[in-house]
Amino acid sequence: MAINLQKGQTISLEKDTNDLSQITIGLGWKIRKKGFFAKLTGGSQEHDLDAIAFVLNEQGKVRNLGEKLIGSDVIFFQNLRHPSGAIYHSGDNRVGGSGDNDDEQIVVKLNALPAQYHRIVFLVQIYQGRRNNQHFGEVESAYMRAIDAKGKEIARYSLGADPNYNGKCIMVFGEVARQGSGWKFSALGEGQATDNFVDILKTHI
């Protein structure tokens, strides 16, 4: 049975009970429907949420920025595969989420990830959220989950509607990090007002 994490909680990913040759980080969301008057003031444009990963070294830095982030240590809708071949993105989902299934996935081949990489931080941004007056306070439910190589769900971190997320256009959901000879999975749940992940990336350069 998957472990349901709370904000700030960390668990070890156990090799003896899970196939950790690779893990899939699934991210899903459901947008709360706006009422008629809210649509008049806030617009009715669909929310475009994007999953992003920063692949960090032991100092918590992104060292390879590629050419305008192409071929870099940043995995996103324009750079779907890490140069090592050990991380790849399922692709941009622009049609919104139902909250029932993963809307986007990022797969990490843990056994193949070069030793220089120590942490992978996972974010979801609302594309052009500030321009479109969209934010995570409108997200009815969202989650991040870790799935092992055999499709077994190991852990899940869920977010409900929370007024503290009003005005927040990026959610730093969590991270996978090396722990001795193994790995750990942490739930972060840190909302940020910016709608451009590059602003957060700058803190890791």
Image: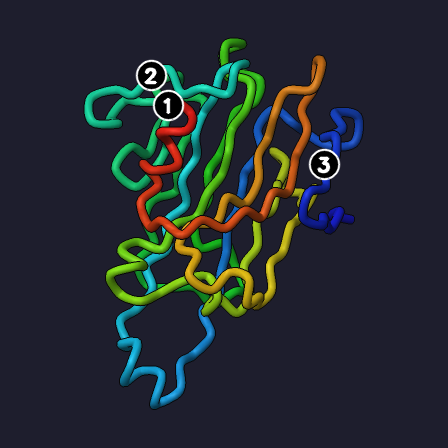
Residue drawn where x is 57% and y is 34% of the image:
175
- Read off the residue under disc 1: 73
**In this rendering, is residue 49 above or below 18?**
below
- Read off the residue under disc 2: 64
The scheme the figure's colours follow is: rainbow
Crowd around label 2: few <14 · some 14–19 · many ≥20 (10 Å): some
**In this rendering, is residue 57 above or below 191?**
above
Distance Cα–Cα, label 3 vs label 2: 27 Å
**In this rendering, is residue 39 above or below 75?**
below
Q: Is residue 5 left or right of residue 53?
A: right
Amino acid type shown at disc 3: Thr
Q: Earlier in the sequence, mark 2 or mark 1?
A: 2
Q: Earlier in the sequence, mark 3 or mark 2?
A: 3
Identify the residue at the far top of this view: 115
- Read off the residue under disc 3: 10
Amino acid type shown at disc 2: Asn
